[in-house]
Amino acid sequence: MEKIERRMKIVFVCTGNTCRSPMAEIVFKKLLAEKLGCQIHELPDKGFEILSGGLAAYDGMAASPNATIVVQKLGVSLEDHQSRYVDIDLIKHSDAVLVMTKNHLDIFQDRFHDQHLPVHMLSFSGSDISDPFGGDEKVYSQCLSEIQENLKHLVFKILS
């Protein structure tokens, strides 16, 4: 398979990179791969780099157990996820940086104001996607549904 030049880099951002942003990353990869008719591991060859990070993350943390459980029900895995702190190396050359809350947007813009990056809320309505951290599986499932709905719009927007 011939490798093509990168067309798009998207980074999902939340607080700790153990719940919302890793769920968004893996589900977005799944939706995008389905639309492109490929496997998730083939997305880089299709020109897509999809990542996630946290504004207050510690590098190397696993995804929360309930995040892992709810995405498994969609047929994807967070078993190998390791959290990472959002630094300039993660976000440089991004076509889109998608945050979960207005507070994340404010922090991001304050921290990286000189970078002129395309930072937006993941939610198309501009509403916050609540942090499920510490919640039960039902709370994570509700959060994932909200993320998934916004990701469907994003895939449509990117591929149309």
Image (tube, rainbow, N blue to C red):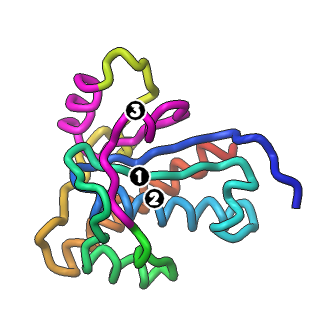
Part of the protein shown in magenta = 82-111
* Label 1 secondary element: strand
| Label 2 crowd bin: few (<14), some (14–19), many (20+), radius 10 Å | many
Q: Residue at 81% of width from left, 46% of height from top? A: 4
> Few, some or many C-alpha atoms within 10 Å of disc 1 (few <14, some 14-19, many ≥20)?
many
| Circle 2: residue type | Glu
**Residue 48 image offset from top left, x and y in percent:** 65, 49
**SS for callout 2:** helix
Mark 3 or 1: the one toward you: 3
Q: Is residue 73 above or below residue 113?
A: below
Relative depth, front residue between 20 and 127: 20
Q: CA distance from mark 1 to mark 2?
A: 6 Å
Q: Residue at x 47, y 55 (%)?
A: 151
Q: Is residue 16 left or right of residue 114?
A: left
The amino acid beneath tag 1 is: Ser
Q: Position of residue 107 (x, y in %)?
A: 21, 31
Q: Is residue 120 above or below residue 71?
A: above
Marks 3/1: CA distance?
A: 13 Å
Report the residue marked by disc 1. 52
| Magenta segment includes 54 | no
Q: Secondary structure at mark 3?
A: helix
Q: Amino acid at mark 3?
A: Ile
Which residue is label 3 attached to?
Answer: 88
